[in-house]
Image: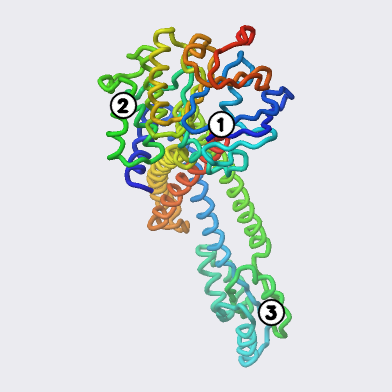
Amino acid sequence: MIDMKNVSVIYDNGAVALENVNVHIGKGEFVFIVGASGAGKSTFVKLLLREILPTSGAIRVNGKDVVHMQHDEVPYLRRGLGVIFQDYRLLPEKTVFENVAFAMQVIEAPRRKMQRSVNSVLDVVGLREKYKCFPNQLSGGEQQRVAIARAIVNDPAILIADEPTGNLDPETSWEIMDIFRRINAVGTTIVMATHDKTIVDTMKKRVIAINDGHIVRDDVRGGYGYEDADK
Amino acid sequence: MKMRTSEYMVRETLISLKRHNWMSIASISTVAVSLFVLGIFMILVLNMNRMASFLESQVQISVYLKDDLSKEDIRGIGDDIRGLQGIDTVAFISRSDAEKRLRERLGEQAYLLDALGEENPLPDSYEVTVRDPSMVETAAKAIAEFSGVEQTKYGQDVVEHLFDITRLIRIFGLVLMLLLAGATLFIISNTIRLTVFARRKEVAIMKYVGATDWFIRWPFMLEGVVMGFAGGVIAAIALKLVYAAAAAKIYDTLAFFPLIPEQPFMTIIGMLIVISGMAIGALGSSISLKRFLKV
């Protein structure tokens, strides 16, 4: 699913974001990427989405060579990935239904399929009856659930979440994690960057800890660990 | 393109135009004004060109013959002139015809000629026109070499000035048109840039869910083209009205002026203006998209 070999990212100003990172994430895994702000979590996520290219090293995602990919192949890489951000990134002038359907529209999915798929993912996140609402009529947790619905509506093999619970209270965060668990249960690989200690410790999933651009720990059933990593 | 996609594109374009309606109106009017000025210049240059070639075609060579030539000699010179390359018409003007003409031209002052008595001071002559105005000088010089020819005259200075002026107008018009096209391009690309900026969230999401570059670009391109089209139509209508009014005025006062007839001239100009509007719109959008849609 995801393979990184000797990946380093050095930004133009000379800052080393990741150095010599080797990671393999298999199909159906649920992986937390933990580390302090600036440790390299975001860089890791950006590499998977090919928002940035590594300075050196090889990356394969969904069987595609991300590094040597042509520019016009990037959209097809991203169709196999669902993304969720801390700030939801919904379109305020579109309804819940339209926000989710938008993801299908822009990849020119058949319209017949659209109605069915959107309804079914709204069921997954429990927002079927709010399909007519606009984002500003929803709570933060509900907005993030819409974002999740949008991320999975095209059936991605991998769901990438960058601090998805960063703006949510603990209880709402658990609702989100519950949805993730269900999505993971049907075989979707989940990569979640976070520094929410309680969630990581309770979920008992694989944990990859990044500190100063290096992978400092990779535990199959880990906790957040490293008290100092979240200073 | 798939049907539902083109529907989507058209809808997005209209929504965007409506959402930024003040911006859209502002850009459409700027485009209209620029294209209007562009069109005015096109019309001016083309009319100037036409006038220049009209005047050029009026230039003729007067070939004055020596006195005491026999009829055969005179006819022979006429044949020789016709034998030259590029000669269009050759007309013989006898000295008595020339006198008649002069009398007509002098009108009330024709009595001046009476002072000469029976003596007619005018020579026999040929009036020669050439097919290509640029050949006037060569032809005149060649004819002057013929025996029996006293001298040849044509409006040397006038012809040369005319060439200079038409060349200047053409260059100036071209430069101005390019400048205006550049300005219009800049305005449209700026407007599209604002639209892209206003919709950057949508664009970012589109990229994340895997929309292709062209899918993202199309609505913006269409928006630019629609703005160019609207501006072009307004400019074309205004140009048509102005030309009709100006033509009426000019025919009233300067009936001989060789103005290009309104039809089909203005239809062609109008179409050109609308097409350039659309082309500039498309180009303007693609410039700003290139810079602001880095995926």
* Left or right position of A141 against A221: left
* Left or right position of A160 against A134: right
Both labels 3 and 2 in a single chain? no
Circle 3 SS class:
helix
Q: Could you tell me which residue is drawn at 65 percent across and 33 percent down?
A: A54
Q: Amino acid at mark 1?
A: Leu
Q: Could you tell me which residue is drawn at 58 percent across and 70 percent down?
A: B113
* Residue B172 drawn above or below residue B54: above
Front one among A36 and B281: A36
Residue A198 at x, y percent in the picture? 50, 9
Q: Look at mark 3 in the image and give the residue it sits on.
A: B143
Q: Look at mark 2 in the image and give the residue it sits on.
A: A97
Q: Residue furthest bottom?
A: B72
**Disc on the earlier residue, 1 or 2:** 1
Front one among A173 and A139: A173
Residue B264 at x, y percent in the picture? 39, 58
* Residue B291 drawn above or below residue B70: above
Could one spot residue B127 in this view of the protein? yes
* Left or right position of B177 against B160: left
- Quadrant where the C terminus of chain B sits is top right
Q: Look at mark 1 in the image and give the residue it sits on.
A: A48
Q: Count every numbered label the image shows and give the total.
A: 3
In this view, the mark in front (3 or 2): 2
Q: Could you tell me which residue is drawn at 70 percent across and 35 percent down?
A: A56
Circle 1 SS class:
helix
Q: Which chain is disc 1 placed on? A: A
Q: Could you tell me which residue is drawn at 32 percent across and 46 percent down?
A: B3
